[in-house]
Image: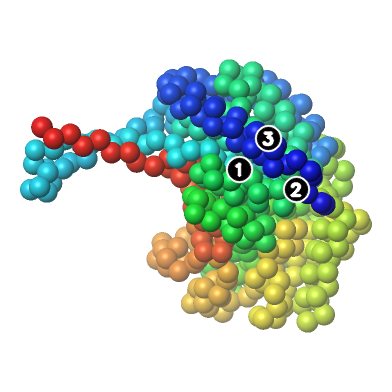
Amino acid sequence: MPERLGFQAIIARMIANATDANQEISVCSRKTRSTWLANIGQAVEQDAEQFVDLIVRFGSKTIRQARAEVSRCAETFHLASMEALALAGKECPFDQSPAGHDRFGMWVRKPIGIIVGITPYNDPLNLVAHKIAPALAVGAAVIVKPHPRTLAVADLLLSKVVSAGVPGNSVQLANCTATETTQLVAMPEVAVVSFTGGKAGGTDIAHAAAGKRILMELGGVNTTVVDRSLELDVKLIAKQIASGIAYAAGQNCIHTQRIIIHGHRYDAIVAALVLELEELRVGDQTLEETDVGPLTTIEHAKMVYSQIASALSCGAQILHGGSGEGRYVQPTLLSSVPANHPILNTEIFGPVAIVERASDFDEILELSKRCVPMINASIYSVSLPNIIRFFESVNAGTVIVNDSTDFRVDNMPFGGNGSAGVGREGIRFAIEQYTEPKLLCIRR
């Protein structure tokens, strides 16, 4: 898409608006900012079904999944409301050094400046909330660039921000192309860029934002391992892993893609997992009974089919699924994927997972160490030593015990290591990224 004539003028106006808003919002009290955030959360709850309708219409979540996202969005603002009140500094103990015996010091956290937040289509409401809520909590203006498919969802949220009494232009929406987005983040007045999306887009944004503070959630190949522990409930494990594979049709940055199972538990877990996947209902996302909705586009679905076909051509086997119709891809479970096949270390972003057999826990660890960096990893085990060994060895931002990888609440530090991301979201942790310490030093 060619660059629009005059977009530089649009950017300049948005930056000027944000600069003016910063001067007003940064001096508002913690109580005032907390009240705004609480009011936004309440407004989201009151108009929940309107948000649900837009998420289902323009996104790809089922109606039940959309309701869960709206509930989380409201919680995100309520959490931010509490964190706005808790934002504080600390005394700096200068007298720990002989040179500072006659000094008193304290530091506070101050917003760095204008924030640009960039969000994808798969969580069109709550991921926008994760850019806006911490910005308002610290008193910083934010420009959000949502995915064009789901702009209507972000626009409705913006109306709740305005009605909550937040000063004008403290939150703005940018409807722009990828090229225009890089121009926006490159503006010298922008201090922080928070990006959630794919690695290719993230690379372009990082280059454009060189010299600024950057937060990036880029996804990865999330891995679940199952230890030998006989005490574990096979049916429950299978149910949780099936959710990790198929939730939001796998269009989820914490989607379970690799499953490494101890040889003594492999057959039982795989058999139970296949049964769970067979019970999932794929179809119209507006129906209450649907478990798995469509992928976002036909092109996306074709890409997923091609990844499955490539693995099969190299010797992989289908344990379940592998087909579909149009944008509706059946939850798919593959085995016998060659160790060098790219599907093991390339995020699929669809309801596809690979099972691998390990002879013992040492091999589980070895296979896990070969995995690319990820956001979440999980382990099913009752052995504390094995849990600790896995926690220390796997390259993940979070390790979840006795649940699948697709667990998140909105106050946890959320993000990946290495190529999976930079920095952490989660309200308090995003607040730290949006602010910096400012020190006061007084000589007595």
Nearest the viewer among 241 and 12 is: 12
N-terminal label among 1 and 2: 1
Instruction: Report which residue position mark 1 lands on.
Output: 117
Local SS, label 3: strand
Q: Tell me what residue is drawn at x 50 percent, y 50 percent.
A: 212
**Structural distance between the alpha carbons of marks 3 and 1:** 9 Å
Other residues around mark 1 within 10 Å, as few (<14) / some (14–19) / many (≥20): many
| Disc on res. 177 | 2
Residue 286 position, x and y percent, is: 84, 37
The Cα–Cα distance between marks 2 and 3, rounded to whole angstroms, is 13 Å
Residue type (three-letter) at the residue carrying disc 1: Gly
State which quarter of the image contains the C terminus.
Answer: top left
Which numbered dot is residue 173? 3
Q: Secondary structure at mark 2?
A: loop
Q: CA distance from mark 1 to mark 2?
A: 14 Å
Can you see residue 25?
A: yes
Q: Position of residue 110 (x, y in %)?
A: 39, 35
Front-most of residues 193 and 312: 193
| Outermost residue toward the right in this view | 325
- For mark 1, give the secondary structure: strand
- Give the foreground label among 1 and 2: 2
Q: Is residue 410 left or right of residue 386?
A: right
- Callout 2, which amino acid? Thr
Say which of 10 and 323 sits in front.
10
| Residue drawn where x is 57% and y is 21% of the image | 167
Q: Which mark is residue 157?
A: none
